[in-house]
């Protein structure tokens, strides 16, 4: 009996998950791909005392949030219906809006909103449990080859 064919979207999800799992830094930080669809990606990161920037506050370090958002943006590019099997960051601007709440994990959401022949444009948000007040927002450009 023949095995069922993997849909293109399922293949993209598998490739994006492998992409994230292959990045040692993403694995070390504990990133988990929560959702991947043509509209974007969601990656979560649990709170961990090793990721805290200031031990007195218990807040996750801004560099960890930056890595999470960069990885989530890359996954969103790969999830695009015409997306590449690999991508790289060309430019990423992050605006930190407030400190994350101590002892809470962070979730990033990213969407690839425009592509050209060679560049994908992405926007993202990072939030803790209060999803009405982002911790940070980002805009970026990533390599894109059809």
Image (cartoon, rainbow, N blue to C red):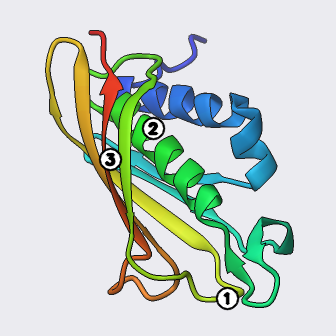
Few, some or many residues within 10 Å of mark 2 (<14, 14–19, 20+): many
Q: Which residue is mark 1?
A: 102
Q: Nearer the viewer, mark 2 or mark 1?
A: 1
| Front disc: 3 or 1 | 1
Identify which residue is drawn at 47% across, 24% down.
11
* Left or right: 60, with 114 as reference point: right
Location of the C terminus (image quadrant): top left
Decide if residue 81 is in sight here. no
Taking the image as drawn, is residue 80 in sight?
A: yes
Q: CA distance from mark 2 to mark 1?
A: 27 Å
* Residue 29 position in % (x across, y down): 75, 53
Residue 12, by quadrant, is top left
Q: Secondary structure at mark 2?
A: helix
Whether residue 144 sits left or right of residue 53 in the image: it is left
Real-space Cα distance between discs 3 and 1?
Answer: 27 Å
Q: Earlier in the sequence, mark 3 or mark 1?
A: 3
Q: Quick check: marks 3 and 1 in contact, CB under 8 Å?
A: no
Image point (37%, 23%), residue name = 8
Q: Position of residue 135 (x, y in %)?
A: 44, 76
Please tell me which residue is depicted at 35% across the width and 52% down the height of the picture.
110
Local crowd at mark 3 within 10 Å, few (<14), some, or many (≥20)? many
Residue labelled with disc 3: 40
Q: Mark 2 sits on what residue?
A: 75
Q: Where residue 108 sits in the image (x, y, percent)? A: 46, 61
Please tell me whether mark 1 sits on a helix, a strand or a loop: loop
Pointer 2 or 1: first along the chain: 2
Which residue occupies the foreground of this view, 84 or 64? 64
Q: Where is 24 relative to 37, above or below?
A: above
Quarter assignment of residue 94: bottom left
Secondary structure, mark 3, is strand
Task: Say which of 71 and 17 sits in front.
Answer: 71
- Give the camera-side residue of 62 and 11: 62
């Amino acid at each position: 009996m023949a095995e069922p064919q993997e849909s293109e979207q399922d293949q993209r999800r598998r490739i994006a998950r492998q992409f994230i799992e292959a990045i040692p830094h993403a694995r070390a930080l504990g990133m988990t791909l929560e959702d991947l669809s043509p509209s974007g990606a969601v990656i979560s990161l649990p709170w961990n005392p090793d990721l805290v920037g200031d031990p007195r506050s218990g807040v996750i370090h801004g560099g960890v949030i930056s890595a999470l958002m960069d990885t989530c943006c890359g996954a969103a590019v790969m999830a695009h219906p015409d997306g590449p099997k690999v991508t790289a960051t060309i430019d990423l601007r992050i605006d930190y809006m407030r400190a994350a709440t101590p002892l809470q994990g962070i979730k990033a959401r990213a969407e690839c909103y425009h592509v050209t022949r060679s560049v994908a444009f992405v926007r993202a948000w990072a939030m803790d449990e209060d999803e009405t007040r982002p911790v940070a927002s980002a805009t970026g450009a990533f390599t894109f080859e059809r």
